[in-house]
Each structure stands twice: as structure tokens, then as C-alpha cells.
Image (cartoon, rainbow, N blue to C red):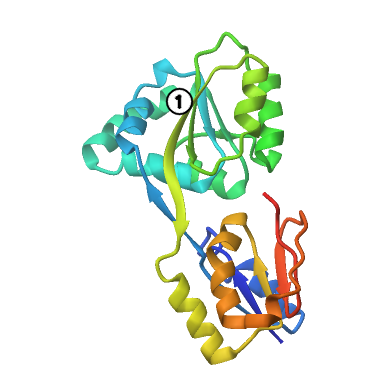
Amino acid sequence: MNVLLLKEPRESDSGPDPYIKELARHGLSATLIPVLSFKFVSLTALSDRVFQPEKHGGLIFTSPRAVEAVKMCIENSALREEWNMVKEKWNAKSVYVVGKATASLVESLGLNPQGEHTGTADVLSRLIVEREDPKILPLLFPCGTLKREVLPTTLRENGLPLEAVTVYQTVDHPDLEINITHYFSKQGIPASIAFFSPSGVKFCLELLKRLVGPQLDQIKLDSSPVCRYRPHHCRCSGG
């Protein structure tokens, strides 16, 4: 039985995507097609802030892409030398993260992440509220255009200053249509298609309707964390 996963590959290069491994363990053949791409923006504004830790009370990262944006700001050798001094000033403050993948990338910058166990921005925001004093300088929050508002809202409601800088935009993968069309032409309609983000649904659904036709007529929507499409049935996330 074939399964199509419309998602980004895992952040690590240590082996196959865990969904592919788990499905194979149950006798299912899974193919992964990347859906999203990220366009980095406002890096000059981010760089200005990254190299002025004295103006901020700490850092917040809720996605690997935000860490990648900071990495891009310090890539050249001249700035790397300056970063080696600046990062110690950041490490004297709190550097908050969500999730192990983000924490690992933060560590690669020489920073000491806190809060990776929280798992979501909602839980992390509560941890920050517990730990930080409203009198601190603004927390620097590099983020994407599709960030959830739960963290900024929670901090604002509790009087904690936050400076959000949009550093990346989520767009469809440049090869998405080619890859999906090729998959259907070679393997036909899979037994299951899984979406892993609302953006994935947005970028793929019309194309799937063209390729699958009337078999998508019976789509059902709910708020499950993953949207699974089987012939005549689909569930997708509502976020």
C-alpha cells in the first residue's frame, strides 16, 4: 500500500524521515514530497539587533528557520569573529526555544537554549512569564509571517516586552507541482495522502483535485493535527 507524505524532511541527516521508517515497519511504502520553501527577509534589520544584545533581555526561537536566519547574519568571517564575542553576552541572558530540532540549531550557534522540553509556543510562553520580570528589556523574537499569535499575546498580557522581527516567508516549494504530477503519473492514486500543515493543504489541494478528480468530492474537515486524505475521505488541520 502506497502513502504520500506532503511534508518537509526531518531536520537531521541521521537517517530516513521517521514517518517513512514507522510506516515501513507496518508494511506501508511511503514517499515524501517537500511542500514548503522559505524566503528570508529583513536580514539587515535582524543583524543589527543580533549584534546588539545589550538592547534586549533575551532571545526567543520557535522554529528552525528563525535560527537559520540568524546563522545567515553571522556567516562571513568578519562577523563570525564579532559573533564569538557577542554570543557570550546573549548567553548571559535567556535564549528560549521550542523543540529539540530548534535547540540543536541554537547550540550550533554557540548559544545555550532553554525550554526545548516545552514543545509548543503556548507552553513556552507560560515558562517565559514564570521566569522573566516585566522590567526586562524587550525579548528579541525572530519569526515567520505565519507565526501563531499565542506567544506574543501571552507575553503582552503579562506585561513582558517583545520585539518581533519577521525574517522569513512561507511559500510553496518551487518543484511541488512537478513532483506531485510525476508521482501520480508513475504510481497512480495512493492509498493515503497526509498533510502536515495548513500551508501544505493550501498549496496542494487544488492540484490534487485536478489529478484525482471526483474522488476528492467527499472531503471532510476537522481540527486534527495532521490532514489525512484517503480516496473519498480527508481530514485536515484547521490552523
- Inspect this view and state whether residue 219 appears: yes
Q: On the picture, is 70 further left or further right than 224?
A: left
Picture quadrant where residue 133 is located: top right
Label 1: which residue? 90
Please determine whether, in this image, residue 91 is positioned above or below residue 169.
Answer: above
Camera-side residue of 92 and 182: 182
Q: Is residue 65 above or below residue 80?
A: below
Residue at position x 61%, y 11% in the image = 134
Residue at left offset 44%, top offset 64%: 173
Whole-percent x, y for residue 201 in the image: 60, 62
Quadrant location, the N terminus? bottom right
Residue 216: percent from left, percent from top: 69, 76
Q: Nearer the viewer, residue 213 or 51?
A: 213
- Quadrant of the rendered image containing residue 9: bottom right
Expressed as whole percent of the image width and height from the top left, the position of residue 139 reads: 51, 23
Q: Residue at x 48, y 84 (%)?
A: 182
Q: Is residue 158 left or right of residue 211?
A: right
Mark 1, secondary structure of its residue: helix
